Image: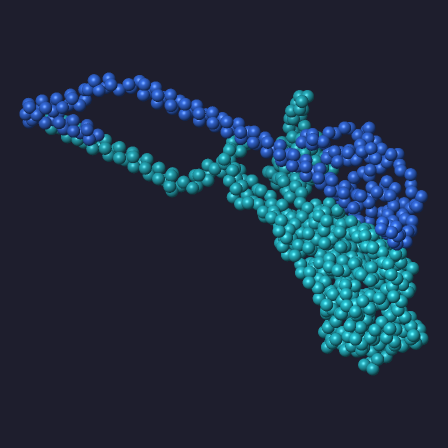
Amino acid sequence: MSDNLARVAGSDFGGLDAASQHDRERRHIEIVASPGLRRARPRVFYALTALAGMGAIVVAQLLLSVGISQGAYELSSLQDERVELGRTADSVSQDVVRVSSPQSLAANAEALGMVSNSNPVYLRLSDGAVLGAPVSASGPAGKTAALVPNALLTGMPLVTELPPPAATPASTPGTGVAGAQPATASVVSPVASAPVAAPVHSGLPSPTTR
Amino acid sequence: MASTRTTHRRRVVVTVMVLFAIIAVFVVKLVDIQVVRAETLNADALGNRSVEDEIYGSRGDILASDGTVLAGTVMRYNITMSPKRAVKFTRTTDSGTESVSVAQAAAEIGGHTGQTPEAILAIIASALADNPDSDFAYVAKQVDVDVFRAVQALDIPWIYFKKTPSRVYPNGAVAGNLVGFVSSEGEAQAGLELDQDACVASANGMRTYERGGDGVPIPGSSVTISEATDGGDVITTIDPDLQWFVQQVLAEQAQATGAAWGTVVVQEAKTGRLLAVADYPSVDPNNVNGTENADDRGSRAFTASFEPGSTFKALTAAAVIDAGLATPGSKIVAPFRYLPENGANINDSSGHGDENLTLTGVLIESSNTGMSKFGEMLDDRQRYDYMTKFGVGTATEAAFPSEDTGILHPWEEWDNQTQYATMFGQGLTTTALQVASIYQAIGNQGVRMPVQLVAGCRQADGTIVNQPSAEGTQVVNADAARSTAQMLEMVYQQGWLADTWKIPGYRVAAKTGTAQMPDGNGGYSRGYLVSVSGFAPADDAQFVVSVSLADPVKMNSSAASAPVFQKVMSQVLKKYRAVPSGAPAPALPATW
């Protein structure tokens, strides 16, 4: 802007002598027109370098952000998977805790024909002495009423009420993520497929003490 | 020429001014956006993209002594819906697309949640009746993962889910009386949940993240505003298997005898730790409403006090021996009716002539008159001091919520009858815990240990804080305690219930009690509170068992509680592998 003003003002001054006018023109030409100098600069090379650099930066930036975004999707899906696996683990471990509650153990033991003996007797190994007075167990004749309730066990079958192993569809542990299937099945099936459970279904012989 | 110059200058000035004006406008706007309104605009911008996410802190567990979880936290899901958007929708499945009506969707949801389709449709209808623009209603609360997944798989667009941490009690009613429960909003309501709330309480945290148009979080945008803190774990002294057994036995006998309620306390004699505290009726914390009477949802062993009756005579006997005023063989004559000089009137429960009894004999016969003759050897103040040292009249160290202190009036306020009645367990009240604690002190060489229900609070870093004191107090000297234990062994061997409570192979010390129950109007009701307290093995006590049954209408005597004592004590001795006693109990003369 100031340059503009100066030029306009300069052209309006008429009272300058020729020598100074000439000087001014010479200086002007020397400064502006310097073709040798211009030619010395490899302008195209610089321009290309700069452009290439910018291009590289843009491409790198794009690749990086694509990479990060890809990672974000992967992270997100893995986190979802972890949440699902966590849910499965929670659900299954809740089932384990539930079936290991005293009520469940007692009911199942009784269903298998076990009777509790409240008279402790010990055999001392050092001298073979029998400590205590052996008395045969007197179990209840029928099923003991479950007097200590547990609402979590509602609908939970006893081991003797399970379908025979063959009828249980083979569920492989590890597919738990797909676990829309009821978790109870995956907990109970190992019990049902265990070899000891086979005679259970057909019924154990009742102990003579009953 | 001059006019041209002027025009030029004017044009320049105008240009400059316009330029400055434009720049000024930009600057003002820039400052306005970047400085003045920066915060609001930033927040708005972030709000369009960012999502707040609550991080749930987990309420701590309540654990049994062996680490069994008595109360734990699980994630449950509330199924909610937008009633105004509950319309027919199109579902895409592998086999193509199908149109699903609201009724059909309701039937599908109900199939998983156990509700009838009508019930779900009624929820929609009532929500819309209240507010035609209703955007929120609960379909089902606190469903588990399996139901959540099943309903989620239905892919119904107007159904939403909300995580809600919830409390679960894997062992049901086992120790439900002690553990207590929380409300559906997660507020502690009773028992240890309430008492130990400071230990188990958690705090939820909050984080925000930004997400793109497809809902995926933008990397690096997650900001945690506050961290969630998990609660600590309460470690109790309860043995869950034993607790179950005791509750089962108590409930069987209470039902068989028609008792209104009953309690059993099992305590370690040497440490004061409570292994089991059973109540009947009791509560399953998973189903609190299943126990109708709110009084049945706590632990009467801590909160209900009663006149202990004859079980209290062991305390008087120990006190008299400790003071050096009597021995197990000291002789008195016990009449049916005894009229002391102060004007009291003492009589035994059944008529008899004068009997020549030793102190041992007084305990075996459970003679009130005989015990009065020994008790009056101490003055009121001395006996009051012994009682307070045994823990009568103060709540136990377990500090259970709403624990009863029992009633022990200061000795100066005792009237003539009370002066004598307090010798054999009337005129004062105790909780079942206090009675157990008296027998614990007698069994443990006269050293009373603090009653322990909670062993400590285990914090997230594994350190255990709030460990209770384990320092005992010598209440009576060891010889007096041993003599009392030997006398109680004679009671066990020769008392009228000897056959009922016999545990082969072990030496046991025990005493029965039968006390009238208050009717709530200052008088006595017709019902009795029958109890048995004792410890085993008698020569080296390890376990104290105290059984109380209130008003067993079908068998109104201690014979109702004796079988419970026998079964529980056998189970404890068996479970903890107590070695059967070798030498027989020393025989002490009961008469002279």
Q: Position of residue B458 (x, y in %)?
A: 64, 51
Chain letter for blue, please: A
Please indicate whether residue B263 sits to the left or right of residue B584 in the image.
left
- The colour one sees for chain B in the rendered image is cyan
Kindly indicate the quadrant of the structure image that contains residue B358.
bottom right
On screen, residue A157 above or below B385: above
Q: Residue furthest bottom?
A: B341
Please state if A134 lies on the left or on the right of B402 as rendered. Answer: right
Horizontal side of residue A91 vs B45, given as left or right: right
Q: Position of residue B314 (x, y in %)?
A: 81, 68
In the displayed structure image, the side of residue B34 where residue B424 appears, left or right:
right
- Nearer to me, B124 or B202: B202
The residue depicted at 84 percent of the width and 37 percent of the height is A160
Find residue B160 and report its horizontal and vertical position in percent: 63, 36
Question: Relative to the observer, which residue lies in front, B133 or A35?
Answer: A35
Give me the residue at 86% from left, 41% from top: A111
Kindly indicate the quadrant of the structure image that contains residue A99.
Answer: top right
Q: Quadrant of the C terminus of chain B?
A: bottom right
The x, y position of residue B485, in whole percent, is 82, 66
> Eyeballing the image, is A53 above or below B188?
above
Please say which color scheme the image uses.
Answer: by chain
Residue sticking out furthest to the front: A127
The quadrant holding residue A169 is top right
Please name the residue shown 80% across and 33% down the image. A194
> In the rendered view of the protein, which quadrant contains the N terminus of chain B?
top left
Residue B528 shows in this picture: no
Q: Nearer the viewer, residue B554 or B514?
A: B514
